[in-house]
Image (cartoon, helix red, strand yellow):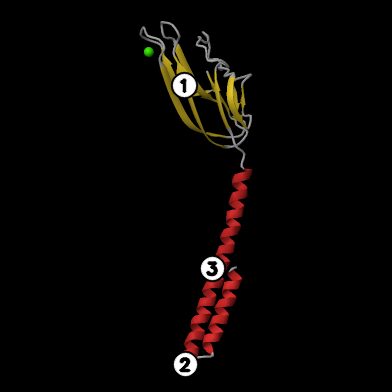
């Protein structure tokens, strides 16, 4: 299409050259050459952009996708988990999605199979009955990152959330303890 446009432009220039005086023709020839060069540059730029677009499209489509969503239990019944004497990885068994299979519900461990920046969010629903004695931490390779807890007072049935954006290398392991 672009090449047709250049050809038409050149024909247009050639036709107009035959109808004018020498000086007019010289000016028009100069203009036509500038215009032709301009269109050729445009064609080159469009081709380059098309190549970049195709490369980006391929990169995006081929990029591995990782995401998961899970709850502690497969049903929606309320119940306490624990107590635990030491930090114990929670096993979220109600897996709603697990794109890329990076989360293992048998161990509760998320293992990054793709290097990248990950967003983790989690919520804790406090003890079903008094007194409150719940705490959950997001652990990255065994190190505590952020926590949610409720361990004082006389209430129950509270809910808290926390989140973190973490750079993960291959085989980085995250758990919720
Ligand atoms: Ca509370």
Identify residue for label 2: 23
Q: Is residue 133 left or right of residue 87?
A: left
Cα–Cα gap, marks 3 and 2: 29 Å
Q: Extreme bottom residue here? A: 22
Q: Which mark is residue 138?
A: none
Per the image, label 1 sits on a secondary structure element best described as: strand
Q: Height in image: 126 above or below 28?
A: above
Per the image, label 2 sits on a secondary structure element best described as: helix
Q: Height in image: 52 above or below 34?
A: above
- Disc 1 vs disc 2: Cβ atoms closer than 8 Å? no
Identify residue for label 3: 42
Ligand 1 position by quadrant: top left
Q: Height in image: 4 above or below 75?
A: below
Identify residue for label 1: 123
The residue located at (47%, 30%) in the rendering is 164
Toward the viewer: 168 or 64? 64
The mark nearer the N terminus, 3 or 2, is 2
């Amino acid at each position: 299409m672009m090449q047709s446009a250049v050809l038409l432009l050149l024909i247009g220039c050639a036709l107009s050259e035959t109808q004018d005086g020498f000086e007019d023709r010289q000016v028009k020839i100069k203009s036509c050459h500038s215009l032709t060069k301009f269109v050729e540059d445009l064609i080159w730029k469009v081709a380059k952009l098309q190549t970049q677009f195709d490369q980006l499209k391929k990169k995006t489509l081929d990029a591995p996708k990782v995401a998961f969503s899970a709850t502690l239990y497969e049903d929606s019944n309320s119940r306490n988990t624990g107590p635990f004497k030491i930090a114990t990885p929670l096993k979220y068994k109600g897996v709603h999605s697990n794109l890329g299979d990076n989360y293992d519900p048998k161990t509760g461990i998320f293992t990054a199979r793709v290097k990248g920046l990950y967003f983790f969010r989690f919520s804790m629903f406090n003890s079903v009955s008094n007194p409150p004695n719940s705490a959950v931490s997001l652990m990255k390779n065994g190190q505590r990152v952020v926590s949610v807890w409720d361990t004082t007072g006389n209430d129950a049935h509270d809910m808290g959330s926390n989140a973190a954006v973490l750079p993960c290398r291959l085989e980085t392991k995250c758990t919720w303890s």
